[in-house]
Amino acid sequence: MTKQEIIAYLKGEDEKGLFARSSALRKEIFGTKIYIRGLIELSNICHCDCLYCGIRASNKSVERYSLDLEPIRAAAKWCTENGWYSVVVQSGELTNSAFTNKITEVVKIIKEESDNKIAITLSCGEQTPEVYKEWREAGADRYLLRIESSNQELFRKIHPSEISFTKRETALNTLPPLGYQTGTGVMIGLPGQTIEDLAGDLLYLSQPQFAMCGMGPYIEHSDTPLSQIPSLYTKEERVKLTLRMIALLRILRPKNNIASSTALGTLSPEARIFAMEIGANVIMPNITPKQLRGNYSLYEGKISDLDLDCFIRSGFRF
Ligand code: SAH
C-alpha cells in the first residue's frame, strides 16, 4: 500500500471495504481467538516529564507507589491458576540500579511462580543495552516501547529535551538482537498531529523488526502542559482513526500482535470490541491490586476494569 492509499483510508474512504479486508485477515490468521496478557502496573514513579502523561515527574498531585514483590508473586500465582500464561509488566521509568534490579527480581519471581509457563512482556522504558540484556537473561520474552510519534518534529514537541527520538530509536533497535519479541506504538490524535503523520506512523510500525503494536487514542490529562493545546480531532474522531489504523496495520503486517488498548476502551468500550473484529488480537486486562489502580493515571477517565464476557458474547474465545 502506498502512503497516498493509506492517507485516503485514514480519511475514511471505503471504510467498509477496508474493514472487510482487515477482518478477513484477522479471521484467517487468528480465527476467533484473543490473546490475553495480564497487565501489572508496577510503579508510577517516573523520572520522565513527557508533556502528555499524567504520571510525569513534575505532576505533584499523583500519589506515587511501587508494588512490593509479594503482590507480584500473588498475581503470577493467580495467572497460572487461571491459565493466563502471559503478563505485561509496565512501569514509570527509572534507570537507577534499585529499579533495574527490582525488575530483574520481578521477572524471576513470575517465571518461578509459574514454573516458567508465563511469557513476560516488559514495558519499562528506555534502558541501556546492558540492562535490557540482564532482564532478557532473567527470563523476559518481549518488550514494548512506543515511538509515540514517528514524526521527529512532533516527537520533539511532546517530550522534554532530554528525551530524544534518536535515543528512543537506538533503544528500540537494541531489543530484537537480544532476542526480545519487540513492539512499538503511537498515540493517535496528538495536538498538531495530521493524517499524513499517522500514515507515516503506520509505515514506521510495519517495519519487519516489530512483531507487536500497541496504539491508542491520545487522551488529555488536565495536569499536563499538552492538555492546554487542542487536538485537531474530537474524541469520536480519534476513536475512528484508531480503528482505521488498526485495520490498516493488520493489512500491512498480517501476523503482528496488535492490541486493542485501554485508551480506546476508555473513549469507547464498544470500539474496543469492534477493534478485535477488524484487526486487533491482544487484550491486556489490568491485574494490578485494585486499591492502587487509580494512581496509574496516564490520562483522564482511564478505565481499570474490563468485562471479558462482552468479548465472548461477541463470539470471541480466549
Ligand atoms: N515508561 C513506560 C510506560 C509508559 S506509559 C514506557 O516508556 O514504555 C505507556 C504508554 O501510555 C506510553 O507509551 C504512551 O503512549 C501512553 N500514554 C501516556 N500518556 C497518554 C495520554 N495522555 N493519552 C494516551 N496515551 C498515553
Image: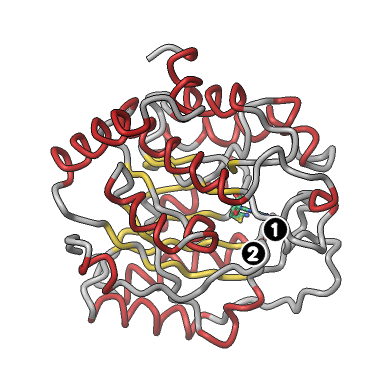
- Distance between mark 1 and mark 2 Cα atoms: 6 Å
Q: Looking at the image, is 300 positioned above or below residue 15?
A: below
Q: What residue type is labelled 1?
A: Leu
Per the image, label 2 sits on a secondary structure element best described as helix
Q: x%, y% of residue 246?
A: 40, 39
Residue at point 38% right, 32% down? Answer: 249
Q: Is residue 282 above or below residue 104?
A: above
> Image quadrant for the C terminus?
bottom left
The residue under the point 68% across, 41% down is 190
Instruction: Say if disc 2 is inside 8 Å of ligand 1.
Output: no
Residue occupying image coordinates x 63% and y 41%: 189
Residue 234: horizontal and vertical position, in percent?
65, 47
User: Which element carries disc 1, helix, strand or loop?
Assistant: loop
In the image, residue 93 sits, relative to residue 128, either above or below, namely: below
Cβ–Cβ under 8 Å for marks 1 and 2 = yes
Q: In which quarter of the image is the N terminus?
A: top left
Q: Quadrant of residue 208?
A: top left
176 in relation to 123, above or below: above
Seen at 85% across and 51% down, the residue is 228
